[in-house]
Structures are given as structure tokens and as C-alpha cells.
Image (tube, rainbow, N blue to C red):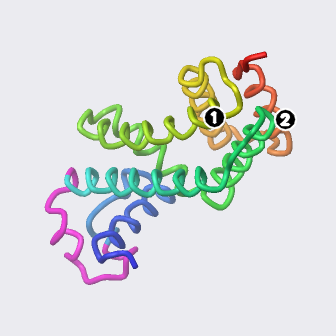
Amino acid sequence: MPSREENLLDAAIGILGNQGVRALTHRAVDAAAAVPTGSTANYFKTRDMLLSAVADRFADRDRATWQAIAGFVRPTTAVELAAALAAYVHRALGPERALTIARYGLFVEAALRPELQGRLAEAALSIRTWGTEWLRAIGSTDPESECAAILDYLDGLIFHQLTFPGPVDQLEAAITQTVSRLCTTAA
């Protein structure tokens, strides 16, 4: 069960994903978490402290999500890997849309606030480690570079779909084609 602090941070992530970073205030988090006014400020004295804690909580949640995915996804071919990644993209654009928007909001904040970069980079490194292992398992000849290229492609694809939505029924084919192109396996 999440602690009160985690509940406040989850409410803050919800605000980021549904209203944007400008809406992230102590009072807004109090209201979203249904706690008395001033509760969030008791944990996080400044907005910068709140934003730093949100980045940490987001990174922890992101890492846990990918750890769960890595626990049950075991692709043996580039096509299976692409199918797993396409399922992730569909969740990111559908049921987890607000969380995805919060992710990109935090990325923009990290571009402006270098102190947030390290927090988010640790989670990204964990994700790249799992992706690299998937690629190694399917016989990639350069799993580290290919993982970076595939994850960067997916980030761009997701961001583009959030900003300029296109037909989602074509995403799986596009992901499969790109993953197949980027993934070189030993003969």
C-alpha cells in the first residue's frame, strides 16, 4: 500500500499528465489527493522540492513497470519484440495516456532543470538494460546501440502520436518494420 507521501506524488503525476506542469502546485496536489490544505507543503516545502520528488517517484514507477514487463516478456525474434513494444505503445497512448504525458512533461522540465536529469536517467538506464538483454536474447550483434535506437524511436513515435495523432491501427506494422530494420541478428 502506498504511503501518504507516495499518494501525494501520484496525485502530482496525475496533475502533470492531465493539466500540465504549470498546474502543479501544492494546493492542486492537496485537492487531487483529497487531503487537507497544506499537507503537500508539509512534505515538500518548495515547488522545486515537489518537482524533484515527483521525478523520483515517476522514475521508481517507470522502473517497476518495465521490471514487470521484463518479467513476463521473453521475445525470441525481432517480430515478437516488436509486438511487445507495440503493446507498450498502445498502453502508453491509451489507458496510460496521462502517465505518458506526465513523462514528457518531466522530460521537458529535465531539459530546463539539470538536477532532474540524473533522477530520470537512472530509470532510463534500467529500461535500456532490459531492452539490451531482449536484443541479446534474439541474437542482436550490437544490442546496446540497437536498444538505444529502438527506444529513441519509440519515444519519438509516442510523442508524435500524442501531439499529432495518426491512425493507431498502423502503429504495430510501423514498429515491426522499424524494429526489424534496426535489429541485426547473427546469421
Seen at 63% across and 40% down, the residue is 158
State which quarter of the image contains the N terminus. bottom left
What range is drawn magenta here?
30-48
Seen at 30% across and 82% down, the residue is 35
- Can you give x and y, in whole percent of width and height, for residue 19 in the image? 47, 57
The reply to whether dot 1 and dot 2 touch (C-beta < 8 Å) is no
Instruction: State the residue in front, 146 or 3.
Output: 146
Instruction: State the residue in front, 122 or 37.
Output: 122
Residue that badge 1 annotates: 154
Horizontal relation, residue 97 to residue 19: left or right: right
Horizontal relation, residue 86 to residue 170: left or right: left
Residue that badge 2 annotates: 173
Q: In which quarter of the image is residue 2?
A: bottom left
The stretch drawn in magenta includes residue 157: no
Amino acid tagged 2: Ala
Horizontal relation, residue 48 to residue 179: left or right: left
Seen at 49% across and 36% down, the residue is 129
Q: In this view, does 93 lie above or below 75?
A: below
